[in-house]
Amino acid sequence: MRLILLAAVLGGLFCTCAIADDDISKVNGSIRVDDGRTVGDLDTVNGSIQLGDNARADGIDTVNGSVEIGSGASATSAETVNGRIGLGERARIAQGVKTVNGAITLATGSDVSGKVSNVNGAIRLEGAHVGGGIETVSGDIEVGAGSRVEGGIRVEKPNGWFNPSSKPPRIVIGPDAVVEGTLDFRREVELHVSDRATVGTIEGATAKRFSGPTP
């Protein structure tokens, strides 16, 4: 009986260690997860993070570096401070995608259940879905053809510490794109909306309608 209990305890410890080992954490250096692999949290300070095609991860977090999520891959969240974030085709993020200084690109069929946000850098959706809205301060936004955004779009007014480019952000809502919720512009923007797009209430800007694939 004692041997059975001891084996059970040791087995539990072994499982805990195996789970912990799935997390990958660094201070200096990039992280790459091979195609099809399943891991835990990915965390570095100075380095990029690349999640291979069809791979799985929990939180993805870096400070100085880009985040690349491969085709068919999935993660709980993806964040960086200085760097771009790119989602491959059919990639899935269960929560949000966030960067401060960097572009965000969502390829065809990719899906972010939460919010997509940054301060500086273009945000581009290519036939993708965002469930929690899009927010920026100084970045251009393109909701490409066939994309869908729930939760609206917000362009914030810069705070006192932040001096944005004098050029207004350019917002484009492409053909057959849908933006549900309010398009809330708290600073000057250049807004272009396809005559085949469906959008919610627009506040703080006047839309320029266009036909064809681009304005």
Image (cartoon, helix red, strand yellow):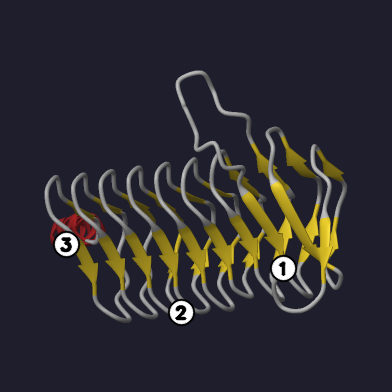
What amino acid type is highlighted by mark number 2? Gly
Residue hosting label 3: 7
At x 32%, y 45%, the residue is: 82
Residue 52 to residue 22: above or below: below
At x 72%, y 69%, the residue is: 174
User: SS class of the residue under badge 3?
Assistant: helix
Residue hosting label 2: 72
At x 41%, y 59%, the residue is: 85
Instruction: Tell me which corner region of the image, top left, top right, bottom left or bottom right, holds residue 135.
Output: top right
Q: Nearer the viewer, residue 39 or 174?
A: 174
**What x and y, as percent, mark residue 119?**
49, 40
Circle 3 packing at 10 Å, graded few (<14), some (14-19), many (20+), is few
- Total numbered badges shown on the rendered structure: 3
User: SS class of the residue under badge 2?
Assistant: loop
Instruction: Tell me which corner region of the image, top left, top right, bottom left or bottom right, holds residue 177.
Output: bottom right
Image quarter where the C terminus lies is bottom right
Would residue 196 appear left or right of 188 to someone viewing this image? right
Q: Nearer the viewer, mark 2 or mark 3?
A: 2
The mark that comes first in sequence, 2 or 1, is: 2
Residue 147 to residue 104: above or below: below
The mark that comes first in sequence, 2 or 3, is: 3
Would residue 193 appear left or right of 100 to someone viewing this image? right
Image quarter where the N terminus lies is bottom left
Q: CA distance from mark 2 to mark 1?
A: 31 Å
Residue hosting label 1: 215
Labels 2 & 1 near each other (Cβ < 8 A): no
The mark that comes first in sequence, 3 or 1, is: 3
What amino acid type is highlighted by mark number 1? Pro
Q: Nearer the viewer, mark 2 or mark 1?
A: 1
At x 27%, y 60%, the residue is: 49
